Image (cartoon, rainbow, N blue to C red):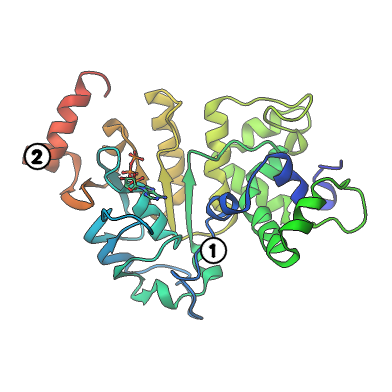
Amino acid sequence: GKMSAGAGSINFGISVLHRNSIGIGYVRELLQIPADSASRGSKFFPDRLVQGIRLNGVSFTYPGRERPVLQKLDLHLRPGERVALVGENGAGKSTIVRLLLGLYRPDEGTITADGVDYADIAPESLHKHVSAVFQDYYKFTFTAAQSVALCETATAAHHAIAEAGPERAASSGHRSEDEAEPIRSGIASIERVRSAAARGGAHPFIAELPLGYDTPIGRLFEGSRELSEGQWQRIAISRPFLRDPQLLVLDEPTAALDAKAEADIYEQFVSAAEDRAVLLISHRLGSARLADRIVVLQDGKIVEDGNHEQLLAAGGVYAQMWEVQAGWYR
Ligand code: ATP
């Protein structure tokens, strides 16, 4: 099928999602599409955050579970500030990210953006302004341009699925892409893709690929290029910049990287984020240390909040974690 970024735009159909075996539920989380229960008003998310995003007394238990994951949590993310969220496995870090994206709604308390309650914000507006890079699903095999434009193009595909119904969407997966009326989806201009890739630090290596932005990457295509972990990461961190999010989250994207490469990715991400609010999640305290403020989460509660030196001096949970990691990583 035709997969080129012809005529200055990036297209792909449901067949691409199909080929990559992505289920519809997965697509929703992948695309970070807010749940109706979390965000369904008609207000807009502020175009430029001034006060920032606040979690106010937020408690949360996953549907069907008994154990609360977050308990009366307060957290303030200011524009221009880089906050690192650290804590043991299962402490609730990713859950906070999902709430910030509006994938779930707090059972108690509110999340506000410059004082506007998430519940009153239109889902499209929330989607446009809050963006996360997750590590589970950053390697998709499209052309380089499509990979950068993944979120935006696939969001339109999601709406197409919703409109056409899953049966039709699934059957279109077997259709040739050149046939009339494929469920074509989203279009992002090649200029915007380039500028996002430049911010994420992906442009230089994409430009060197044999077909540039039209080079298939990943393992599924014959003759496609596999990228290094660091290059995949740069594609992943380019994606949010197709939109103009006011809160950017990097959710532990770098498990496969060594410490130096992780620090490079963090630096790229943080400098590209400019004056936006940034939340970084990492198990490596050597990376968390680069943030302006470190928030320590334990059993769904914030137990410490301060910069690296302050938290070391406090001699609490963070200081202990730092001691433990000193043996195997810095
Ligand atoms: P890690 O460092 O391992 O990624 P985390 O701090 O990000 O952990 P969460 O992923 O937020 O922790 O998980 C917090 C708790 O919620 C864990 O006990 C986890 O098992 C549970 N949990 C996470 N996702 C779900 C889900 N979709 N449904 C039910 N329970 C979940």
What residue is disc 2 on?
Answer: 316
Point out residue 11 in the picture as x, y percentages from the top left corner.
Answer: 77, 51
Answer above or below: position of 104 versus 325.
below
Q: Is residue 267 left or right of residue 20?
A: left
Point out residue 242 in the picture as x, y percentages from the top left corner.
Answer: 60, 54
Q: Looking at the picture, which amino acid does disc 2 mark?
A: Gly
Q: Residue at x 85, y 52 (%)?
A: 7
Q: Where, quadrant-wise, is the C terminus in this rendering?
A: top left
Mark 1 residue crowding within 10 angstroms, few (<14) / some (14–19) / many (20+): many
Point out residue 329 in the picture as x, y percentages from the top left corner.
Answer: 27, 22
Q: Is residue 178 left or right of residue 225?
A: right
Question: Where, by quadrant of the figure, is residue 98 drawn?
Answer: bottom left
Q: Looking at the picture, which amino acid does disc 1 mark?
A: Lys
| Along the line of sight, the residue nearer the viewer: 131 or 39 | 39
Residue 133 visible at all = yes
Q: Residue at x 48, y 70 (%)?
A: 47
| Along the line of sight, the residue nearer the viewer: 78 or 135 | 135
Point out residue 105 in the picture as x, y percentages from the top left corner.
Answer: 39, 66
- Residue 327: mark: none
Q: Is residue 202 left or right of residue 10?
A: left
Question: Where, by quadrant of the figure, is residue 322 drawn?
Answer: top left
What residue is disc 1 on?
Answer: 128
